Image: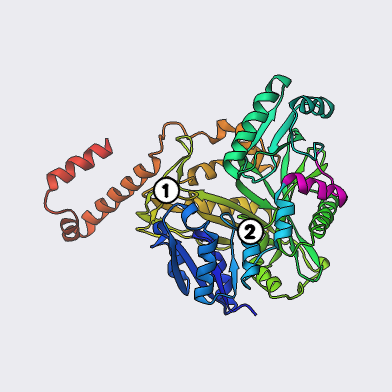
Amino acid sequence: MIKKVLVANRGEIAIRIMRSCREMGIRTIGVFSEADRSSMHVRYADEAYFIGPSPSVDSYLKIEKIIEVAKTSGADAIHPGYGFLSENANFSARCQEEGIIFIGPDAHAINTMGDKITARKTMIAAGVPVVPGTTEPIKDLKKAVEVIREIGLPVMIKASAGGGGKGMRLVKEESQILDAVSSARSEAKAAFGDDAVYIEKYIDSPHHIEFQILGDKHGHVVHLFERECSVQRRHQKVVEETPSPIITSKVRAEMGEAAVAAAKAVNYHGAGTIEFIVDDNLNYYFLEMNTRLQVEHPVTERVVGVDLVKQQINISNGFELAFKQEDLKQHGHAIEVRIYAEDSDNNFMPSPGIIKHITEPLGLGVRHDGYVYEGYEIPIYYDPMISKLIVWGETRSEAIARMKRALYNYKITGVKTSIPYLSRILEVPAFVEGRYNTHFIEENQQYLMPRKNCDGQCEDVAIITAFFDYITKLEKIQPQAITKELGNNWKDFGRKRSILRL
């Protein structure tokens, strides 16, 4: 039985994992880099150990250092979270070699599904629909041209390793093939150390739909339904929801069966996600598998009522799944948005700095997974996501209204955040009506640009106005308090108040 878990991650996901461990009576070990000495996950863990300099390559990606800390601290198991080493087959294998439980799949499943070309072959053999394309790396450009002519333009050139939109190029004309293959290879080599790329038919008006799956070590696999992830910017998800507003019950059942078949094809155990591309006619095709917990897993937890981290731990303990497919139901609607420390009005530039004030949204149906606090300095070394905001409602319209309210109540000062941008997304007619695809952001720029005559200072003006209204009322009812608040420089105060009124 797992009694002590080392969480090989940082930020909100580290805290989220530790919360479930605490409910299960499991002690937690945190690890931190130089930049994270004052991070909230270090405070929340039962124990915490320093693992290296701020850059992740020198700390959170150091397999041997993390293994050393696990052995020193007496950890039974390691939970990798997402990102960093979560889909590293070598890490999973090293844990097994050292007798440490890796809370995730084995190295075979990670290797098979982590390489997209191998995954495509595996899915074809399992009878899972895949997007038309090649099942071997592109080596001969002349052959590549022949294949593209056979498939038909447009096509995508995609890296076999990695993800996150790196090593991907859209080809609409034959004249673009050479440059697309060359640049995709170069980017894939730099990002993943592997320049293998393949060809895949480009689906017009694509919807990105993913299915959450759970598999135990006894051969049982279930799906926990779908998540709609089509609101994306540069292939990075921005808003996720479940159920999908476009999927019918018939197609949902078919896709769920395909997701289970995909997991069984690699004897998968743990939590994972089968991702599909869906066209406007609801034809669906396997895209890839994420062999880890997803950033957007809370929406599934809220609608299905299952704690996915606890399930991961139970599976790692060797338990059978406590439920069958027919036991799982969707109830209500959930939406998640990702809050980034970035300036969406300035080409989404990262906005590291010190949090001066934070008011987290509360109320019925609201969940906030974050890790920052007042006085905390957001480091420059990691992804700028600082929290996730999740809401639930009986209906999709109620969930949207609740998310609008929660974003309105969410106040962070000291750094720029994506909150205003997310609020604008919820107002776009295509989103409100549930008729959007992965082109949503580029097709709705007129709604997503900053409000005119505001210049990003509306909230500041509102705060100043509210403060002076407070001072004016205080002056009338408690003149001594106003003297103490502002001092005796009444003339200066009067000038400032007159200017503001003008």
Q: What's the magenta bit mostly, secondary-structure-wise?
A: helix
Depth check, front residue: 4 or 337: 4
Whether residue 443 is visible here, answered yes or no, is no
Is 117 part of what is drawn in magenta? yes
On the image, the x and y values in percent for residue 415 come to 39, 47
Q: Which residues are magenta?
A: 116-131
Residue beneath disc 2: 90
Quadrant of the snapshot with the C terminus: top left
On the image, the x and y values in percent for residue 437 come to 69, 39
Mark 1 neighbour class, 10 Å CA radius: few under 14, some 14 to 19, many 20 or more: some
Q: Is residue 11 above or below residue 339?
A: below
Q: Is residue 132 left or right of residue 361?
A: right
- Cα–Cα gap, marks 1 and 2: 27 Å
Quarter of image, res 448? top right
For the point 57% across and 40% down, the residue is: 190
- Which structural element holds mark 2? helix
Which amino acid does the dot numbered 1 rest on?
Ile
